[in-house]
Image (tube, helix red, strand yellow):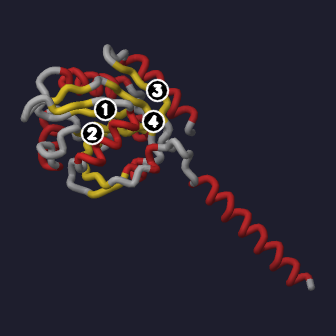
Amino acid sequence: MKIVISLLFSLILFASCKENKKQETTLPSNSIFNLTSNWKNQNGDSLQLHNLQGKTLVVVMIYTSCKLACPILVAKMKTIESKISRKDIDKVSLVLVTIDPKTDSSARLKEFAKTNNMDAPQWVFLTSNEEATQEFANVLAMKYKKISPVDFSHSNIISVFSPNGQLVSQEEGAIEVDNVVSTVHKTVKESK
């Protein structure tokens, strides 16, 4: 009888642990990791956004042939990266998503990353198809429109997401780098 009770108790405990683990991995309904679109990074690896889960994300949408706003956004992302505490940098991904997937292949993104000294592990460049790109832009409330064969008009937004994919903050327009860095440090600290 003791063996049966002990076995029953073990099964209940196991089921309880399994249920708790399942609850821990359930994403909030407003998580970007619920998007199921397919992407490629600068190394040509296929992934979905949930593959970025577990790190604080700093996200911006750009395109590599941009001559006006994107170089400023890239410079701001590099400044943000330089101000993130080195003890926390492995808990952060700086994600640049192209709004020009027809031009910005994985190979082009890789070259752009290398040229701009953004090829350390914390840098992630993503490209997909136009539908997935538009869906992602809609989630960020980022507007863009092709205005010529080589140019886009677009919003300037840098977003910070928690490790479970929830939007924490956005800086738009004249982006305050120190605000973004402060939010990143706070989000990393809260996720420990």
Describe residue 41's horizontal placement relative to residue 85 as left or right. left
Q: From the viewer's side, name the closer residue of 76 and 121.
A: 76
The disc placed on residue 97 is: 2
Mark 3–mark 4 Cα distance, whole angstroms, equals: 7 Å
Place residue 92 in its image quadrant: top left
Residue, x 9% and y 31% (percent of image)?
148
Outermost residue on the right side: it is 1
Give the mark nearer the N terminus: 2 vs 4. Answer: 2
On screen, residue 107 versus residue 88, left or right, reads left
- What residue appears at the point 42 percent right and 51 percent down from the top-left corner? 50
Which residue was labeled with disc 1? 60
Q: Which residue is mark 4?
A: 161
Q: Which residue is mark 3?
A: 169
Q: Secondary structure at mark 3?
A: strand
Q: Residue at x 76, y 74 (%)?
A: 11
Residue 43: x %, y % from top left? 21, 52
Q: Which mark is residue 118?
A: none
For marks 3 and 4, the one nearer the N-term is: 4
Mark 3 and mark 2: span between their CA atoms? 17 Å
Gap between marks 4 and 1 measured at Cα: 11 Å
On screen, residue 139 versus residue 123, left or right, reads right
Q: Amino acid at mark 2?
A: Val
Q: Which badge, 3 or 2, comes first in the chain's sequence?
A: 2
